[in-house]
């Protein structure tokens, strides 16, 4: 006999799971959500939010150091700032607590029952939840699997000691004097930049021939330039081989086959994340897989009736806002509404310095799909607002169909461009044409004007260049 019965059981209270549970509760479904961590998942506890807090703190510290060295805006001087990393980590933890408590409150408001513990399927409709104090059985008419993802571990650099994952990197006692980052993707570059600005000597070890290999070279160039200006050493085509003599330097095989020792007090391994598909009784279910992910259809239903999968466990892109959108959709489906995944694009932002935003197709992807395209690109060097912010590196680029000017993709690199992602996504989701973007009044002076100018440029008549 089950201890609890419900219409909907959600396993995992990350951005996918908690959004699904809140929406289901709003729709009147009798909903239970299980997690052994505070609600918010990877994103709120050990991912998006704490990383962005440290990135911001590092930016503030770095700006003060630049002022102290008289390298900032002429006329501003300051004395060398102090860094109390423990206090910064405490401030970051305070933000995390506010948010996770907030999610707990939202679940309560939506009348969702939060059961702390680890869930394990007994069969397709029954789950056992184990916590330190109790074991409970939950029987559910529908289940959403939202177990998220975990960091990939390298066999020659297992986590432990000086080899850390992003989770430990977010709660260090102090910035390591020398930090080696294995993997020059999202996490490695976001955190590597923050530690470089906080005083660490950072070396990035990336296996492919360039950092951020999933972004096109034009977008990555300003980021690389900035990293080099920060004194970050970048080794591409480089493979980490392990630690010399147990706990020594990081051994790296360089592109030419030679070996190099990288001195490091901490080695941050950020070579990707993998969906969490083990440890919760998947073998009790009859699910189909899609590579490492659980296969779902466009309603996020798995091969089993009444069992859904969302978020990182259900496929790329492994991003919080994609998980949330799936959570909201599946809750409505379980409540009987007709919904399916029909998003035109999922925006992606890399919170490096400068930031990178992409939505929709890159020029190469659009060309590869056989579409004839027009491209307009506008540099921040010609944007007044960028100059007043003392950061005119980067550009905004717009990709559109050549025949009807439908916007297919938008990319930007520049300081603070993350906040433009919403405007870019809206343009794509609304099916905007170049004329719509060009014909929209963009307030002056803003970086967004470069978006309008990129559209003008694609139409052949940019004004300010
Ligand atoms: P998760 O957030 O991973 O949540 C899954 C939850 O399920 C966890 O709380 C886990 O404890 C729980 N769980 C797992 N198994 C069980 C079980 N058997 N029983 C009970 N509970 C279980 N994405 C962005 O969009 N923007 C960013 O800026 C960003 N920054 C990131 C920075 C870092 C350092 C990291 C690591 C990730 C970042 N991400 C970012 C990715 C983002 O965190 C994930 O895409 C997002 O959290 C996925 O949400 P989810 O709900 O699928 O899973
Ligand atoms: P990633 O996939 O972004 O980057 C991993 C990098 O490691 C790649 O460049 C890859 O070529 C490299 N690599 C792989 N094996 C290697 C090896 N043996 N030696 C050296 N380099 C190696 O992965 P991540 O940075 O760990 O982030 C994981 C995921 O988390 C991301 O894909 C993203 O979905 C999510 N995330 C998103 C954000 C954001 O939205 N701003 C921030 C952080 C994380």
Image: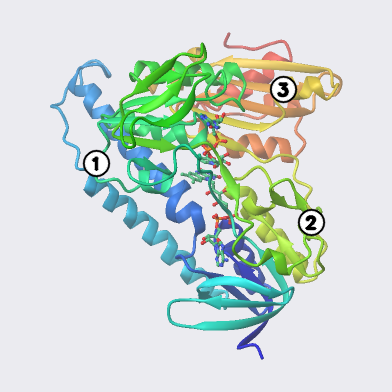
- The mark nearer the N terminus, 2 or 1, is 1
The picture places residue 276, in percent across and down from the top left corner, at: 60, 55
Dividing the image into four equal quarters, which quarter contains ligand 2? top right
The CB of the residue at mark 1 lies under 8 Å from ligand 1: no
Disc 2 element: loop
- Residue position marked by numbered label 1 in the rendering: 174
Q: Nearer the viewer, mark 3 or mark 1?
A: 1
* Near-viewer residue (299 or 374): 299
User: Contact (CB < 8 A) between labels 3 and 1?
Assistant: no
- Residue position marked by numbered label 3 in the rendering: 399
| Residue furthest out toward the front | 245
Residue drawn at point x = 43 percent, y = 27 percent: 353
Decide: few, some or many residues near mark 2? Use Cα within 10 Å; few <14, some 14-19, many ≥20: few
Q: Nearer the viewer, mark 2 or mark 1?
A: 2
User: Contact (CB < 8 A) between labels 2 and 3?
Assistant: no
Query: To which quarter of the image does residue 25 belong?
Result: bottom right
Position of residue 379 in the picture relative to residue 353 (left or right): right
Determine the CA span between mark 3 and mark 1.
Answer: 43 Å
Q: Quadrant of the C terminus?
A: top right
Position of residue 272 in the picture relative to residue 178 (left or right): right
- The mark nearer the N terminus, 3 or 1, is 1
Determine the CA span between mark 2 and mark 1.
Answer: 44 Å
* Near-viewer residue (147 or 26): 147
- Residue position marked by numbered label 2 in the rendering: 288
Disc 1 element: loop
The picture places residue 253, in percent across and down from the top left corner, at: 47, 20
- Depicted 304 relative to depicted 162: above or below: below
Query: To which quarter of the image does residue 435 belong?
Result: top right
């Amino acid at each position: 006999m089950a201890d609890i019965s419900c219409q909907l059981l959600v396993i995992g209270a990350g951005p996918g799971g908690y959004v699904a549970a809140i929406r289901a509760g709003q729709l009147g479904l009798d909903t239970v959500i299980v997690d052994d961590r505070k609600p918010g998942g990877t994103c709120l506890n050990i991912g998006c939010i704490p990383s962005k807090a440290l990135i911001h703190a590092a930016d503030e510290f770095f700006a003060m150091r630049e002022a102290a060295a008289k390298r900032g805006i002429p006329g501003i001087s300051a004395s060398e700032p102090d860094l109390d990393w423990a206090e910064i980590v405490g401030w970051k933890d305070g933000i995390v607590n506010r948010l996770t408590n907030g999610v707990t409150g939202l679940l309560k408001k939506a009348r969702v029952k939060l059961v702390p513990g680890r869930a394990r399927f007994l069969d397709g409709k029954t789950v056992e939840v184990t916590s330190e104090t109790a074991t409970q059985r939950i029987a559910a008419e529908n289940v959403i699997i939202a177990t998220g993802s975990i960091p990939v571990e390298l066999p020659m650099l297992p986590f432990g000691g000086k080899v850390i994952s992003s989770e430990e990197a977010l709660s260090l006692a102090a910035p390591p004097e020398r930090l080696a980052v294995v993997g020059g993707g999202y996490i490695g570059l976001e955190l590597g930049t923050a530690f470089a600005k906080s005083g660490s000597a950072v070396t990035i070890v990336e296996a492919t021939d360039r950092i951020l290999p999933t972004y096109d070279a034009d977008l990555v160039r300003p980021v690389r330039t900035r990293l080099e200006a920060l004194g970050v050493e970048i080794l591409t085509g480089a493979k980490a081989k392990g630690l010399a003599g147990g706990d020594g330097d990081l051994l790296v095989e360089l592109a030419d086959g030679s070996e190099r020792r990288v001195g490091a007090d901490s080695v941050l391994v950020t070579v990707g994340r993998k969906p969490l598909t083990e440890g919760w009784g998947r073998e009790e279910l009859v699910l189909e897989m899609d590579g490492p992910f659980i296969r779902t259809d466009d309603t996020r239903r798995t091969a089993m009736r009444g069992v859904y999968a969302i978020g990182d466990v259900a496929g790329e892109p492994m991003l919080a806002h994609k998980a949330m959108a799936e959570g909201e959709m599946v809750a409505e489906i379980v409540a009987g509404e007709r919904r399916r995944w029909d998003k035109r694009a999922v925006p992606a932002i890399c919170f490096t310095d400068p930031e990178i935003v992409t939505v929709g197709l890159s020029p190469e992807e659009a060309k590869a799909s056989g579409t004839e395209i027009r491209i307009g690109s506008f540099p921040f060097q010609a944007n007044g607002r960028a100059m007043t912010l003392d950061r005119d590196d980067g550009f905004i680029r717009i990709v559109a169909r050549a025949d009807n000017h439908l916007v297919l993709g938008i990319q930007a690199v520049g300081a603070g461009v993350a906040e433009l992602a919403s405007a870019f996504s809206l343009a794509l989701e609304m099916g905007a044409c170049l004329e719509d973007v060009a014909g929209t009044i963009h307030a002056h002076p803003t970086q967004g004007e470069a978006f309008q100018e990129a559209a003008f440029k694609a139409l052949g008549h940019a004004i300010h260049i």
